[in-house]
Amino acid sequence: MSVVRADADSIARAAQLLRDGGLVAFPTETVYGLGADARNADAVRRIFVAKGRPEDHPVIVHVEDLAAAEGWIADMPDDARALAQAFWPGPLTLIVPRAADVLDAITGGQSSVGLRVPAHPVARALLAAFRGGIAAPSANRFGHVSPTTARHVADDLGDAVDLILDGGACDVGIESTIVAFMTGTPMLLRPGGIPLDAIAGVLGRMPLSRDATAPRASGTLTSHYAPRTPASLVKPDALLAELAQLEERDERIAVLAVSARRPDAFDGVWISAPNDATIYARMLYANLRALDGADADAILIERVPQERDWAAIGDRLARATSGEIDDRD
Ligand code: TXA
Ligand code: MG
């Protein structure tokens, strides 16, 4: 494995590695992706091995633009096209009926395919150099926190990846919003980088919330995005009370706060995140990794505002603190 600064030479090398069936981690505006040639079944299978992810989970295909996306789709619903025109390139993934020749390794054997046109200049340059679809889940080990720096990828995947393109820290910081178009009505599978209100603005209505008929999406398993240290979510006013109790039990605590102030006597790791959803999201996974690396017995996370702007963050925090470890992704 090697980490290289993304420039014209390293991007050309990365594109060649993809053509040769290799694995390349690259930055997107949301999180780093673990990329492989989406038309090469062996290469796509290597993604699952590297992540330790079950083989029947589908993978998003990253493409250059809407025209390139059409080559992967049997039938593009009008609402899906409207969202693509409004938000691509950007942090939006569309789940649409697959073209017949899309690999089962990509779709998890389902009748749909997930497509995204990323906005990050390095991702775009890689797609332009490769001239094909790049299959890429988040470049983390199965069930772990997503990576927002090249260092996070190296820490998680090490030698399982052939090359890591370092394009700095990701700007959005949480994954794309996923909207499925597999029935007559758009369905939100995962809140993410494009706010729900913006999606509703284009569709003229809110997408349905996911239900039992939703296509499978591993990011929607309860215990996703989890740090390894036991983590719990606490209301702002309960945080300090909880801290006092835990200190009596002589445990080492790590805290991610928004509004709560650090007590003078507190001697664990304390991260104060900004009370701004955009900046909070940008730093979220790096903060969770820092808390996880603090060698604490427990992590306490202050609940964020219950407002629509914070919905994707609230979703990730709920999953990071669910305490279930048996169906991680
Ligand atoms: O922002 C993102 O979306 C990042 C960057 C790298 O693009 N990618 C990402 O991929 O988050 P991943 O695999 O970690 O999460 C994508 C989710 C998974 O839960 C996967 O199961 C779901 O999307 N998914 C992909 N294709 C699907 C399909 N055809 N039907 C249902 N769910 C799908
Ligand atoms: Mg993921």
Image: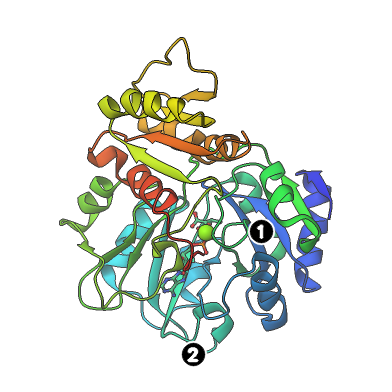
Front residue of 18/192: it is: 192
Residue 246: give x, y in percent of width and height: 42, 30
- Disc assigned to residue 100: 2
Q: Is residue 103 visible?
A: no
Q: Is mark 2 within 8 Å of ligand 1?
A: no
Please tell me whether mark 1 or mark 2 is closer to you in this view.
Answer: 2
Residue 193: give x, y in percent of width and height: 40, 47
Q: Quadrant of residue 290?
A: top right
User: What is the tally of numbered marks visible in this picture?
Assistant: 2
Q: Residue furthest left?
A: 205
Q: Residue at x 27, y 46 (%)?
A: 198
The residue to which callout 1 is attached is 128
The reply, left or right, for residue 280 in relation to residue 15 is left
Q: Amino acid at mark 1?
A: Ala
Front residue of 42/254: it is: 254
Q: Residue at x 78, y 69 (%)?
A: 22
Circle 2 SS class: loop
The reply, left or right, for residue 94 in relation to residue 128 is left
Q: Residue at x 40, y 35 (%)?
A: 301
